[in-house]
Amino acid sequence: MPVSAVPDFRAAPSAAAVLAELGPLGDLPGTWSGHGFNLIARPDFEGGNDIFLELNPTDERLKFDAIGGPIPNRGSAMDDIEIFGLHYLQQVSDQDTGGAIHTEPGLWLNVPATTEPAQLPTVVRLATIPHGTAVLLQGTSSQLTGPPVIDQANTVPFPIGSAEPTPGASNGFPEYDLGAPSRFRTTPTPPLVTQAVVSDPNSVLTSVIAGQTITATTALHVSTVTNPAKHTLGGAETIPFLGTNADVGHVSATFWIETVQLPAPYQDRYFLQLQYTQTVFLSFLGLSWPHVSVATLRKVT
């Protein structure tokens, strides 16, 4: 059968051209592996408490594959655009037990600027989670000469709809105090988990890069929160059970793709490192409960 008669055939550019069109996502294709930390206060109606605080040092594997050609979006108010992207599979397990914690297939997209609507170039992450959630997060990218600036991550619950607590705010829930024994918290406390890590999971990231020489960073910030100034928007859809018991309020995440220089005498050599921090705000019992996940991964293939 001639190519012109094959109904599902679409000519595509070369692999090198596709990678170039990924823009700020161009270094992601491949397999990344490393470690991180997961903190989640989950409802514990069955256990007779408001929450159970789960604390997990993690192992992670994150694989990205470029989509082999452009994705055409047809315009009615302006000319068509072409989106380039990649699909990914994230797999996270507990570092101590090896038990599965999280699996997530999804997509990252590099979206060009548009006139209708007036929009700068953006990056978009589409994620699906087996609990029964689908999330779209949009945002922007930036290029840094040197290492990233990683702010403190909040783990303090707060009333739904109110402002998030400032860094270092006190936490009145005893489960977050490692000095107070609790059967409603991961026990025994994993050796790598300290009070500083519970109060600020991003400290896990900053401790890794404190002794590194990072020469360049690509930052990807995406969120479901509508903020025209930051070009973020999106949303989450969940199954009815989650809507009643632990709904997803909003999600924000920042990924840093870092070029790391080796120390002397190998300072002419570099490797790629991927760090991220993500907060999913779970809504139940009238509060927003920050579920924070962080990791530092290195590109292995």
Image (cartoon, grey):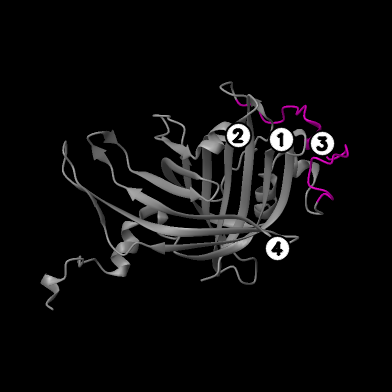
Q: Is residue 265 magenta?
A: no
Q: What separation in Å lies between label 1 and label 4 (alpha carbons)? A: 26 Å
Residue denoted by label 4? 98
Disc 3 to disc 4: CB gap under 8 Å: no
Disc 3 vs disc 4: which is toward the camera? Answer: 4
- Where does the N terminus fall, quadrant-wise? bottom left
Of callouts 3 and 2, the N-terminal one: 3
The magenta region covers 164-189
* Circle 4 crowding by C-alpha within 10 Å: few under 14, some 14–19, many from 20: few
Residue corresponding to mark 1: 45
Provide the secondary structure element on which disc 4 rests. Answer: loop
Using the numbered discs, state the Cα–Cα distance from disc 3 to disc 2 in whole angstroms: 25 Å
- Tell me the kind of residue under disc 1: Phe
> Which quadrant of the figure has residue 152?
top right
Answer with mark 1 or mark 3, whichever residue precedes in sequence: 1
Res. 279 in view: yes
For numbered disc 2, what is the local secondary structure? helix
- The circle on residue 177 is 3
Amino acid bearing label 2: Asn
Q: Main secondary structure of the magenta part?
A: loop
Residue type of the residue flagged with mark 3: Asp
Q: Using the numbered discs, state the Cα–Cα distance from disc 4 to disc 2 in whole angstroms.
A: 27 Å
Q: Which marked residue is nearer to the observer: mark 1 or mark 4?
A: 1
Disc nearer the start of the sequence (1/4): 1
Which comes sooner in the sequence, label 4 or label 2? Answer: 4
Q: Earlier in the sequence, mark 3 or mark 4?
A: 4
